[in-house]
Amino acid sequence: MGEDKVSYIRRDPLFRELVDKRTRFAWQLSAAMLVIYFGFIAIIAFAPKVLATPIGSGVMTVGIPVGLFVIISAFVLTGLYVYRANSEFDPITRQIMEKVK
Amino acid sequence: MRALNGVFIALALVAIAGAFGDALAAGAVEGGGRQALNIPAIIMFFIFVAATLGITKWAASRTKSAADFYAAGGGITGFQNGLAIAGDYMSAASFLGISGLVFATGFDGLIYSVGWLVGWPIVLFLIAERLRNLGKYTFADVAAFRLEQTPIRTLAATGTLTVVAFYLIAQMVGAGKLIELLFGLPYLYAIILVGALMITYVAFGGMVATTWVQIIKACLLLGGATFMAFMVLASFGFSTEAMFRAAVDIHPKHDAIMAPGGLVSDPISAISLGLALMFGTAGLPHILMRFFTVADAKAARKSVFYATGFIGYFYILTFIIGFGAITLLMNDPSYFKVAASGAYNKITDLIGGTNMAAIHLANAVGGSLFLGFISAVAFATILAVVAGLTLAGASAVSHDLYASVIAKGRVPEDKEVRLSKISAIGIGIVAIVLGYIFENQNVAFMVGLAFAVAASCNFPVLLMSVFWKGTTSRGALLGGFLGLIAAVVMVVLSPAVWVKTFGFKAALFPYDNPALFSMTIAFVGIWLFSRVDASARARAERDAFEAQYVRSETGIGAAEALAH
């Protein structure tokens, strides 16, 4: 890729838009995963009793659905990213590529 | 190479034949520690080996260029790569270890498995697409994109080989013990067999064969685990409440298995372990390499999505399998070492240890035929993981150290690939020797160490060189090496190694996992030494960020680089 092509893309408002949107979204999702996981660890470290609380009259405790929630949230967060990347980020990237072809 | 191919297949077959013959003879007299010869397991194992060797032969005929050898020519789809990543990541340790931990402690097993999953979204959000856009065969391609080749590739190759070495030793020792137990095969034969097969896959079939071994293994493992979890749930009329109630009644710890126990003792250890698992995943060289096997960033993104789904689903299955083992095994003395009085400890006396919970459960829900199937799956699991590690190590030697550092890029492609194959053979032989030396050593800390090094060297260097314009060669080199050395030294001085392995009285470093400290050292080191770097070279490297940035965000230029 030549110098002029780089600086052309760099000045392209579409490129700015793509990078701003995607970077913000990626860090938001990363922060969400960190908060969910380390929140889970913090509850275990500081308030394990909360997770030991039985649900209703059964032996199932709050901890089981909470643990499952952490696993499922990892999958859902990746799904959210892929959905938005396919539907929103990829078309912008294609537009940028068309311009510099 | 063709003749060598035959030699290794022959070696593998001789090892198998000799070993099983030996085991037959030994089994007749010993019968004690080792399992009696498991015929269905051996038949299924032979089918797996024959199928994978067939694939290796096919892959070898398709592997013509360096791109074929290192990256399967970029021809793997997102879905296939997702399965292969899952196959690369779900080790026998996570299948048997986590279900065993659930069997022994209940809920704590879930806490542990969650840690192994949460790194994947981070890989997707921050690493996967940029890696695909910038790199060719190894993550060093990305880290050294605008930095000086010699120091950065040396650093990345050192990080890669350190991770591969520790991970591989842990896998080899685990494999030897497991195969000894499952197939009644002597330890030494078992590791020679594993070594010979992994050399064959990697040296002759390259990434194509390695990928397909991982895909097949992932399907077998997910299929087998699904069947077990289904049978467990079916035996309780698909009521998880009934299953949990039965487990609480039977397990010696009763209610305590439904709540966090002693796994998380102090917050610092818990956070440090969490960081190592989360960011170590994003720095494992054999995993990062998988993103170069797909066509573009979109496929790389898809592969993490599928991989996260498969791995998360697998951990939910291991949780059910662990509870199934509690309910279906603990009241049956035939799975335990029973004292003359008829008494047995429902956890520690399980034949083969708690890590065998899933294997015994296979017998309980599906009889000896299914036990054989799961045993063969456990073996396939090991092979797929060690093959991925060997390929990553061989690529670091040939593509990073030799082609870029020593030969300064002036090396013909076929020579580089030949060197990679020789490296794979060398790594395999070293792995067999180390596996033999470490047979009776405590290697449990080694996987943790591999993750700590990946999180404290590979990941910070990769992240900072891609995201921060200010990163310079000097900063990345010093920070990366400081992180690597800190991780290794702190693990050596930790309770797990200094006290439990070396036998000293008190640990010099109080935590078993160093990631919280060693990652901080790496990031601060990279930042600080980059900031104070006022050389002309540093200025040029900062200026070169623009072009790297445009390519990492859009992928423009990535296709041309691959086509050369």
Image (cartoon, coloured by chain):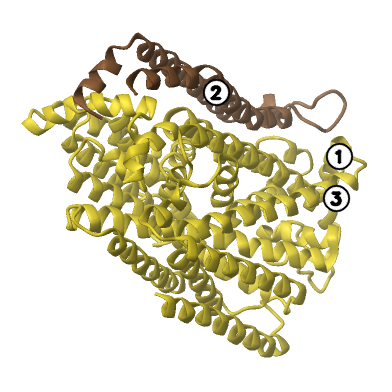
**Side of B518 relative to A82 (left or right):** left
Q: Chain of mark 2?
A: A
Instruction: Check disc 2: other Cα within 10 Å, few if <14, some if 14-19, many if 20+.
Output: few
Q: Mark 1 or 2, which is nearer the eye?
A: 2
Residue A85 percent across, percent down from the top left: 52, 22
**Side of B458 relative to B238 (left or right):** left
Instruction: State the yellow chain.
Output: B
Disc 1 marks which residue?
B245
**Residue type marked 3:** Met
Q: Chain of mark 1?
A: B
Residue B86 percent across, percent down from the top left: 58, 46
First in residue order: circle 1 vs circle 3: 3
Identified at 88% across, 26% down, the residue is A57
Instruction: State the brown chain.
Output: A
Residue B431 percent across, percent down from the top left: 42, 68
- Give the quarter of the image for residue B456: top left
Name the element at disc 2: helix
Q: Chain of mark 3?
A: B
**Do the residues indicated by labels 2 and 3 lie within the same chain of the protein?**
no
**Do the residues indicated by labels 1 and 3 lie within the same chain of the protein?**
yes
Cα gap from disc 2 to disc 3, whole angstroms: 38 Å
Q: Is residue B306 above or below residue B16?
A: above
Disc 2 marks which residue?
A86
Q: Mark 1 or 3, which is nearer the eye?
A: 3
Name the element at disc 3: helix
Q: Nearer the viewer, residue B503 or B201?
A: B201
Instruction: Check disc 3: other Cα within 10 Å, few if <14, some if 14-19, many if 20+.
Output: some
Disc 3 marks which residue?
B231
Cα gap from disc 1 to disc 2, whole angstroms: 44 Å
**Residue type marked 2:** Asn
**Residue type marked 1:** Arg
Check the picture and name the quadrant holding the N terminus of chain B: bottom left
